[in-house]
Each structure stands twice: as structure tokens, then as C-alpha cells.
Amino acid sequence: MNIRIFALSMGVIYFIVGILGFFPALMSAPSANAPAMTTPYGLLFGMFPVNSLHNIVHLILGAWGILVYRDLDGSRVYSRSLAVIYAVLGVFGLIPALNTLFGLVPLFSHDVWLHLLTAAAAAYFGFIMPVTAEMGQPRPTDKSRPIS
């Protein structure tokens, strides 16, 4: 997989997750001992706490990934941004005072490991993976080769 395909894949996944979060049939009520929120939320697939604002963020990040996948530099910026955003959200989910993002977005429970896993994958594609010719960069020319 290359950076562009990663951006497209994450874009499609997060866009679909953003849409699915608006379907009440896919949501279950949070447990009684779940952190208190100022906005209502539910558990998508009974595991991932989401609310409307969370779903909108998923839709925006998903659309961004879909829109930039054709451009290598845009895909790299997307991957790097996703790495930073989700790393911060994953760390926030580990801190009880921040795991609801001031009562606006649920970031606890299974969201923590999902955000940290997304951040790790995005960091690899955005910061570590080398850029190759197959990803859209021009190949270096060899001036010693005769032109045929």
C-alpha cells in the first residue's frame, strides 16, 4: 500500500463511519458508569462512543482523505495531519479530565485504542514511508543512457 491508497482507504472508512454514526439502529446506550457528557451520545456497534459532533469530524476527515488521494503531497499532508490529530485524541482519551473533550466529544473506551492505532498507521505513511516513483514522483533521469 502506498501513501495515496492509505489516504483513500482512511478517507472511505472514516466517511462511512461518520454516516453510520447517524443511524440509531446501529447505536446502543452507554453503560451507567460511563463518563458524563453535556451532549447525548451512543455506542456505535455497541463499542465506540460517538455523538453528532464526533460523526461530523469523521465525515470531514473522511472527505478530506478522499479528495486528496490523487495528489501525493496532499496525501502525505493528510497522513501527517491524521497522525497528529489522532495521537492527540488518543492521549486525551487516556486522561480522565479530557476524555470527553470538555463534554463535547466522547474519546474514551474503545475509541482510545482505535485513535492510537490510526495515529500509528498514519505516522508510518506520513512520516516514515519513502516516496517512490510508483507513488507519482517522476523517476530520476539517467543522462548516461543513449537516447533511442
Image (spheres, rainbow, N blue to C red):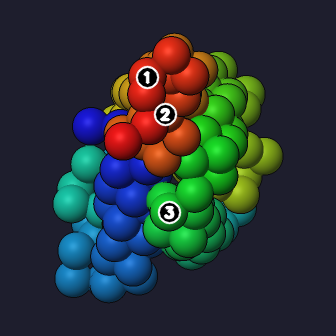
Q: In this view, does 80 lie to the left or right of 97?
A: left
Residue type beneath disc 3: Arg
- Can the viewer see residue 14 in this picture? no
Q: Are marks 2 and 1 in contact (CB under 8 Å)?
A: no
Q: Nearer the viewer, mark 2 or mark 1?
A: 1
Q: Circle 1: is it few (<14), some (14-19), or many (20+) Cα within 10 Å?
A: few
Q: Mark 2 points at which residue?
A: 139
Residue drawn at x 51%, y 16% as measured from the top left: 144
Task: Say if 123 sits above or below 46 in the image.
Answer: above
Q: Is residue 110 left or right of residue 129?
A: left
- Count neighbours of disc 2 (C-alpha within 10 A) and say few if under 14, some if 14 to 19, many if 20 or more: few
Q: Which amino acid does label 2 sit on?
A: Arg
Mark closer to the chain start, 2 or 1: 2
**What element does badge 2 sit on?**
loop
Judge depth for marks 2 and 3 and give the one in front: 2
Rendering coords of residue 29 (x, y %): 32, 64
Left or right: 108 as drawn, with respect to 103:
left
Q: Is residue 90 above or below residue 78?
A: above
The residue to which callout 3 is attached is: 70
Mark 1 secondary-structure assignment: loop
Counting residues from the N terminus, which is met first, the one under dot 1 or under dot 3? 3
Question: Residue at 22% of width from left, 56% of height from top?
Answer: 46
Point out the tag, 2 or 3, that comes first from the N-terminus. Answer: 3
Residue found farthest to the right: 102
Distance in Å between CA atoms under marks 2 and 1: 14 Å
Per the image, label 3 sits on a secondary structure element best described as loop
Q: Position of residue 140 (x, y in %)?
A: 54, 27
Kindly identify which residue carries mark 1: 145
Amino acid at the residue labelled 1: Arg
The image shows residue 83 at horizontal and vertical percentages of 59, 31
The number of discs equals: 3
Determine the CA span between mark 2 and mark 3: 18 Å
